Image (cartoon, grey):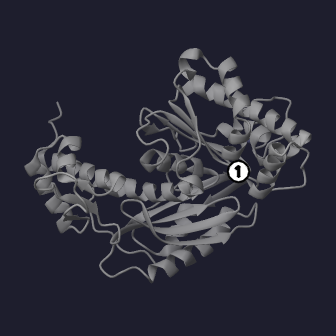
């Protein structure tokens, strides 16, 4: 029979819970921490003192107090001093940021990325961004690790990228390549862009407090981050959520994965441009131009957008039946497609999804906009650190 957790284990769990709370909610009064974490005042005081001694939180008086009497001290995350690097490899751009505890972007870099280029080509420019930002880090800062969001199929164990939208099948050990380039001791965690964007929306976006939701992310391809019972559905190897390759139209278009009629061939960028007679275009601007034409009354664009909205609703109805989510969020290009074709999506949902599964589902656009994959990459790094914040002192990267 296993003995219960030791006093020390409980203390470490509580340290993580307190730090996570102020990471997610920002400066928080001690009285609120007592209530929300269900710990007594003296325990909160002792935990706060330990985290403050490690330089992870600061304490002070609240900025304003509307109530009479002695104000409760607030506990703040040390956002300026405790940080992670967040990197995002997107279809058309590369992003790098230094993100402070509490999710605050302290420094940021961005570059265009040629379409269809190999994920490995992103390593050198991203590493250069990190080194550049590292020069500006104040002395005495604490580095906790790095997270990377990649549009592609990613193996969780080592960050191997296997399939990229527009680039087909590849075999790139991205995590190891970045670690070698950065020459740092911190952990580098690589995740699929839709998965980590969902994590960001769950932590501080549209899905805050939602234990069951689906975040659909569209660019050239379609990915999903799925939370079920408060846990990310990543599957055995990390490849879960590849809803873009769910076959919806067996006689349909060939897909970059080698199959035919995958959902992304109907609702991805190519599908939308094809359906609206804009075969020559590509990129977010082309998608927005078609939706704009539809809004202005262009008949061919309107028919195409309705067609794509219908396919979007078709897949969403199936996902709703499988996962019974509280919310479906449409991100990337799907945000704009959904806003232009919400009636078709809703109509498919109403006719195809089981009433019990669709009754409570809310259809939403993201709370964090296009920064969600970048902010989610930071959360990947913080997630590990927050599990046991006093475990070890991180070494700076680069
Ligand atoms: Zn496919």
Label 1 element class: loop
Q: Quadrant of residue 307?
A: top right
Establish if 166 lies above or below 352: below
Give the position of the N terminus as an image quadrant. Answer: top left
Q: Is residue 307 above or below residue 63?
A: above
- Judge left or right: residue 77 versus residue 189: left
Q: Label 1, on which residue?
A: 219
Q: Where residue 356 appears, x then y in whole percent?
A: 54, 16
Is residue 183 something that shows in the picture?
yes
- Place of residue 42 in the rendered image (x, y in percent of width and height, measured from the top left): 8, 51
Give whichever of 167, 279 is nearer the camera.
279
Taking the spot 66% from the left edge, 24% from the top edge, the residue there is 349
Name the side, left or right, on which 282 lies relative to 54: right
- Name the foreground residue: 372 vs 151: 372
Image quadrant in which you'd find residue 73: bottom left
Image quadrant assignment for residue 355: top right
């Amino acid at each position: 029979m296993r003995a219960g957790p030791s006093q020390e284990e409980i203390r470490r769990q509580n340290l993580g819970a307190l730090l996570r709370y102020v990471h997610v909610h920002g400066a928080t009064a001690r009285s609120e921490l007592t209530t929300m974490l269900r710990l007594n005042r003296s325990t909160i005081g002792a935990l706060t003192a330990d985290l403050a001694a490690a330089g992870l939180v600061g304490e002070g008086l609240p900025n304003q107090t509307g109530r009479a009497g002695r104000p409760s001290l607030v506990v703040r995350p040390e956002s300026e001093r405790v940080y992670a690097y967040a990197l995002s490899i997107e279809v058309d751009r590369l992003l790098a940021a230094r993100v402070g505890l509490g999710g605050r972007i302290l420094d940021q870099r961005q570059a265009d990325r040629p379409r269809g280029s190999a994920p490995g080509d992103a390593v050198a420019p991203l590493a250069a961004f990190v080194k550049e930002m590292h020069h500006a880090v104040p002395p005495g800062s604490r580095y906790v690790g790095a997270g990377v969001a990649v549009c592609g199929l990613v193996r969780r164990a080592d960050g191997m990228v296997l399939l990229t939208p527009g680039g087909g099948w590849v075999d790139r050990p991205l995590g190891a390549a970045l670690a070698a380039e950065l020459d740092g001791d911190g952990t580098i965690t690589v995740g699929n862009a839709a998965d980590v964007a969902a994590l960001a929306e769950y932590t501080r976006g549209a899905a805050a407090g939602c234990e069951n939701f689906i975040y659909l992310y569209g660019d050239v391809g379609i990915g999903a981050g799925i939370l079920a019972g408060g846990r990310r559905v990543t599957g055995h190897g990390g490849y879960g959520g590849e809803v873009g390759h769910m076959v919806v139209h067996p006689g349909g278009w060939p897909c970059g994965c080698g199959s035919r009629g995958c959902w992304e061939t109907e609702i991805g960028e190519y599908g939308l441009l094809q359906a609206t007679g804009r075969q020559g275009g590509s990129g977010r601007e082309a998608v927005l131009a078609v939706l704009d034409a539809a809004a202005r009354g262009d008949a061919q664009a309107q028919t195409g957008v309705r067609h794509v909205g219908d396919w979007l609703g078709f897949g969403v109805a199936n996902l709703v039946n499988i996962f019974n989510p509280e919310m479906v969020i449409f991100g990337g290009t799907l945000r704009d497609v959904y806003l232009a074709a919400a009636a078709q999506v809703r109509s498919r949902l109403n006719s195809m999804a089981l009433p019990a599964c669709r009754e409570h589902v809310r259809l939403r656009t993201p709370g964090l906009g296009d920064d969600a994959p970048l902010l989610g990459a930071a959360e990947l790094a913080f997630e590990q650190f927050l599990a046991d914040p006093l475990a070890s002192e991180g070494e700076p990267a680069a």
